[in-house]
Image (spheres, helix red, strand yellow):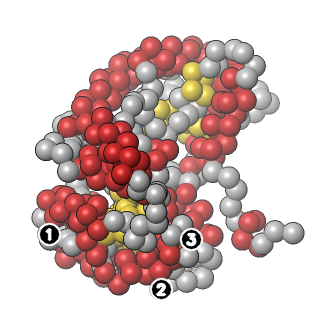
């Protein structure tokens, strides 16, 4: 009944985890939901004021396909500062979240049979979108190299069909931050094989000191014309439901993105565009994300202290973003085979049923032995959730 391509994708595992948590909540038992890909925070005042003002002005019509010019211009100006190279509005397409930006890029750049290199564990949408357009994700494991890809493994994955490589730093689900040397090596590889670099910096505002976020184009300016910078206001401004993100890249690719978008969503939501524009035009638009990052750094430290009580379960990376990623390999390897808890899916189910803690199994990210939890929740929930999680996992060890 359905198209062939529907055999290639299923609803994202993170959405599945969210649904399981919601279903559990209806049982009336208390649940601590650490499954979400978002921070518990109100949006900035300027966004709310900007949205209200846009409503009052009667901003109710279609906008330019890839976003109103003043918004693209201010994004271009900010990118000029972030990358050290001048950008103009026509090199920016505003989209309904970074997710749409990435899908537009896939439609604009990939032909059936093309290959895209994706470091794993990966954010589930990267390979799913590649499959949806008939191309092939080539997954490169990163566990052995500290959850950032090794340049040797990336190089081995290149074939004549390779068209692009996904570079996501800080990464979801692991929160690994790519260093400058690695970015430079990736740039060299991409230049050698004429690859596109899809640079997703959605969590770039949340890198925990002393580490720093490195923009790919600033680090490897020679690759500017082969790079698509993807970013989102979802995480940095706590606006996940508003759906606003962007892609910046060469004008001809942005024109293709515009053509695609003109036949899908027509334009990103008009009120969200004006709201974020109002925020970005303030004197200190980065203060909100900066304060949020400080709050998250505090939560991360508190969370790591609780998780240090775990036996047999290391917390990996957690250098950026707002996720803890647990490596369950040793715990699972030590379990009896018939013990009923054989992989991360089983562990996630057990945590929900016994501890009332919702997490996301690593299987959503191509890793049957990982578990993702967000620490972007309210502090008392974090404390309760992690304490219960530690008790339950230690009882398995
Ligand atoms: N990229 C990464 C790595 C993400 O984790 C997410 C959301 O979880 C996105 C992109 C999409 O963000 P949005 O579509 O909300 O802008």
* Mark 3 residue crowding within 10 angstroms, few (<14) / some (14–19) / many (20+): few
Label 1, residues with CA under 10 Å away: few <14, some 14-19, many ≥20: some
- Coordinates of residue 184 in the picture (x, y in percent): 23, 66
Residue at the extreme front of the image, as rendered: 57
Residue identifier under label 1:
85
Task: Give left or right: position of 31 versus 308.
Answer: right
Q: Distance between the residues labelled 3 and 2?
A: 31 Å
Q: Where is residue 362 in the image (x, y as percent from the top left)?
A: 58, 43
**Can see residue 28?**
yes
- Asked if residue 196 lies left or right of residue 90, the reply is right
Q: Which of marks 3 and 1 is in front?
A: 3
Residue 65 on image: x %, y %: 43, 71
Q: Mark 3 points at which residue?
A: 264
Task: Check mark 3 vs ligand 1: CB closer than 8 Å? yes or no.
Answer: no
Q: Quadrant of the N terminus?
A: bottom right
**To which residue does mark 2 refer?**
160
Residue shown at the point (41%, 48%) measured from the top left: 55
- The earlier-in-sequence mark between 3 and 2 is 2
Q: Nearer the viewer, residue 361 or 12?
A: 12
Which residue is at 75% across, 19% downward? Answer: 27
């Amino acid at each position: 009944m359905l198209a062939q391509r529907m055999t290639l994708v299923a609803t994202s595992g993170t959405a599945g985890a969210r649904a399981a948590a919601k279903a559990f909540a209806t049982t009336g038992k208390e649940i601590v939901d650490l499954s979400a890909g978002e921070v518990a925070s109100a949006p900035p005042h300027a966004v709310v004021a900007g949205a209200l003002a846009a409503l009052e002005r009667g901003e109710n019509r279609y906008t330019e396909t890839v976003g109103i010019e003043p918004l693209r211009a201010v994004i271009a100006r900010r990118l000029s500062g972030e990358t050290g190279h001048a950008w103009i509005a026509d090199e920016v397409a505003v989209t309904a979240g970074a997710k749409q930006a990435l899908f537009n890029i896939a439609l604009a750049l990939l032909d059936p049979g093309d290959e895209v290199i994706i470091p794993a564990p990966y954010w589930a949408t990267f390979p799913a979108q590649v499959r949806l357009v008939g191309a092939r994700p080539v997954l490169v494991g990163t566990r052995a190299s500290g959850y950032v890809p090794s340049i040797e493994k990336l190089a081995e994955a290149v074939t004549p069909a390779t068209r692009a490589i996904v570079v996501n730093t800080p990464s979801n689900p692991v929160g690994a931050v790519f260093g400058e040397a690695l970015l430079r090596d990736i740039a060299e590889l991409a230049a050698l094989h004429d690859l596109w670099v899809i640079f997703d910096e959605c969590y770039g505002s949340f890198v925990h000191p002393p580490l720093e976020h490195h923009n790919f184009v600033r680090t490897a300016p020679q690759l500017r014309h082969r790079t698509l910078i993807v970013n989102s206001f979802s995480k940095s401004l706590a606006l996940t439901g508003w759906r606003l993100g962007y892609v910046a890249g060469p004008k001809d690719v942005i024109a293709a993105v515009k053509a695609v978008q003109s036949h899908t969503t027509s334009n990103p939501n008009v009120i969200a565009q004006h709201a974020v524009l109002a925020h970005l035009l303030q004197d200190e638009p980065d203060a909100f994300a900066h304060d949020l990052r400080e709050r998250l750094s505090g939560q991360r430290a508190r969370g790591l202290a609780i998780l240090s009580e775990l036996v047999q379960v290391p917390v990996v990376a957690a250098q950026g973003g707002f996720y803890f990623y647990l490596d369950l390999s040793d715990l699972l390897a030590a379990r009896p085979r018939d013990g009923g808890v054989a992989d991360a899916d089983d562990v996630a189910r057990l945590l929900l049923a016994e501890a009332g803690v919702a997490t996301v199994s690593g299987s959503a990210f191509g890793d049957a032995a990982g578990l993702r939890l967000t620490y972007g929740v309210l502090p008392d929930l974090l404390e309760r959730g992690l304490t219960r999680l530690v008790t339950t996992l230690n009882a398995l060890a």
